[in-house]
Image: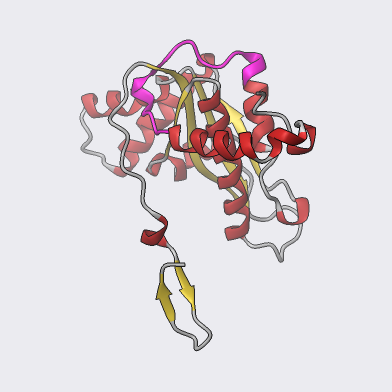
Amino acid sequence: MNLTALPEQLPVQHRDSDLATLVPALMQSRQTILPKRLAAPGPDAGQLELILNAAASAPDHGQLLPWRFVIVPQAARAALAEVFGAALVERDASATPEQVAQAQEKAHRSPLLMLLVVDGECGNPDIDLAERIVSAGCAVQNMLLMATALGYGSALTSGKALKSDGLRRLFGLAQGEHALCFVSMGSVQSRKIARLRPAPGDFVSTLSPDGQIVAGF
């Protein structure tokens, strides 16, 4: 079955049974694969389009489209590496050449690298930054799930360099824009044993009629 098909496009007999089986299996199979464990090939042009189209299904209060992705091709990795190195030195003037080189090397990992940017000011000012970040998180999760469905590993990475002036200049971030994280995708070279997922009882509680918070649902 085509996982990209909309529910209304699926045959009636598949709308409940197949999706109810396929979607949880896809979600549970997603696993963070660190960029150092990702290698070529990455998604091709057609697969990348599927991945990016998945992001468009994220909830977006007010239809602001408050997030965007910037692809960092191989030809631009050296510039990003310089930013990573400079950001480390700015934070720690005693950083050794080896430490700077390690920071720079991170820019060259994974075949597909994207920066997620969230705009806290575009559109309706009544829709605050938290809602915009939630929308961006949903967009990213959709992309990670599509990458998983296509057989690729993926990861989200952050770090103090995201807040550096050098990174803001490199990516042309405007006032009110925030570099949220990097998204990496590629072919899995190795993976750790999948972690145990939390059960709903670990993170769900219920508000009782008398105003008490009761564990569970």
Check the image and name the residue furthest to the bottom.
210
Q: Residue at x 70, y 51 (%)?
A: 60
Q: Which residues are magenta?
A: 31-47
Q: Quadrant of the N terminus?
A: top right
Q: Is residue 170 visible?
A: no
Q: Nearer the viewer, residue 192 or 78?
A: 192
38 magenta-colored: yes
Q: Residue at x 71, y 66 (%)?
A: 126
Q: Nearer the viewer, residue 96 or 49?
A: 49
Q: Residue at x 38, y 37 (%)?
A: 87
133 magenta-colored: no
**Image vertical order of residue 159 relative to residue 201, above or below:** above
- In the picture, measured across the screen, residue 96 lies left or right of residue 187, that is left
- In the picture, measured across the screen, residue 161 lies left or right of residue 57, that is left
Check the image and name the residue furthest to the front.
13
Residue 6 x %, y %: 74, 35
Check the image and name the residue furthest to the right.
9
Question: How many numbered discs, if any?
Answer: 0
Q: Nearer the viewer, residue 31 or 63?
A: 31
Q: Is residue 143 visible?
A: yes
- In the picture, measured across the screen, residue 205 lies left or right of residue 99, that is right
Asked which colour scheme the image uses, the reply is secondary structure
